[in-house]
Image: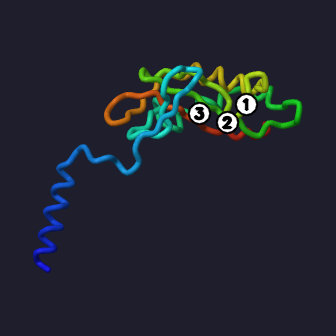
């Protein structure tokens, strides 16, 4: 029994020393045809909005809601998606699961606002700065 405990102890020390062991959740990416490069959806270090998520939320609170009525009535949410490139710039902003011609006026305003955001701290995978696809949903309440 003593030997088994010693063996397990030495094995655990060996694993801690090995820095090439893959993480439990490896980084994941896919090829984006419009950007013509890989974009990550899962990373070791998430991108950071200057001021954090509260600042991100308050940034979009300034979007005007006049266009929140579309042909089918009230638009209750905006599913915004964009890529944070290696420099932290916002690129390829759009609305998830909609074609450009289907965008409402409110969608267009959120995209416009996203493009005006300050630079983010970019995402990292294995210590390397990588482009990251960020998606978030904004709930719209009537005012």
Residue found farthest to the bottom: 1
Q: Position of residue 94 (x, y in %)?
A: 65, 26
The number of numbered discs placed on residues in the rendered structure image is 3
Residue placed at 42% from the left, 40% from the top?
27
Between marks 1 and 2 in the image, the one whose residue lies nearer the viewer: 1
Question: Which residue is disc 1 drawn over?
Answer: 98
* Between 33 and 66, the one nearer to me in the picture: 33
Q: Nearer the viewer, residue 33 or 140?
A: 33
Q: Nearer the viewer, mark 3 or mark 1?
A: 1
Please give the residue where the numbered disc 3 appears in the rendered image. Answer: 58
Q: Residue at x 45, y 33 (%)?
A: 48
- Against 37, is 2 above or below? below
Q: Which of the two discs, 2 and 3, sits closer to the camera? A: 2
Quadrant where the image shows the C terminus: top right
Labelled pair 3, 1 in contact (Cβ < 8 Å): no
Residue beneath disc 2: 79
Relative image position of residue 47 (x, y in whole percent): 44, 33
Cα distance in 3D space between marks 2 and 3: 17 Å
What secondary structure is marked by label 2?
strand
| Vertical comparison of 11 with 43: above or below | below
The image position of residue 76, as x and y in percent, is 77, 40
Q: Say if 135 sits above or below 83 in the image.
A: below
Q: Upstream in the sequence, badge 2 or badge 3? A: 3
Which of the 4 image quadrants contains residue 14? bottom left
N-terminal label among 1 and 2: 2
Label 1 close to label 2 by CB (< 8 Å): yes
């Amino acid at each position: 029994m003593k030997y088994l405990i010693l063996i397990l102890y030495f094995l655990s020390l060996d694993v801690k020393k090995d820095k090439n062991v893959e993480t439990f959740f490896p980084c994941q990416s896919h090829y984006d045809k419009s950007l013509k490069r890989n974009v990550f959806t899962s990373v070791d270090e998430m991108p950071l909005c200057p001021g954090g998520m509260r600042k991100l939320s308050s940034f979009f609170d300034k979007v005007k809601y006049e266009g929140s009525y579309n042909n089918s009535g009230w638009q209750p949410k905006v599913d915004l998606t964009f890529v944070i490139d290696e420099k932290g710039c916002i690129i390829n902003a759009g609305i998830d699961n909609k074609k450009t011609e289907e965008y409402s006026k409110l969608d267009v305003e959120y995209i416009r606002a996203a493009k005006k955001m300050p630079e983010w701290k970019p995402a990292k995978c294995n210590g390397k700065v990588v482009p990251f696809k960020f998606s978030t949903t904004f709930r719209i309440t009537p005012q």
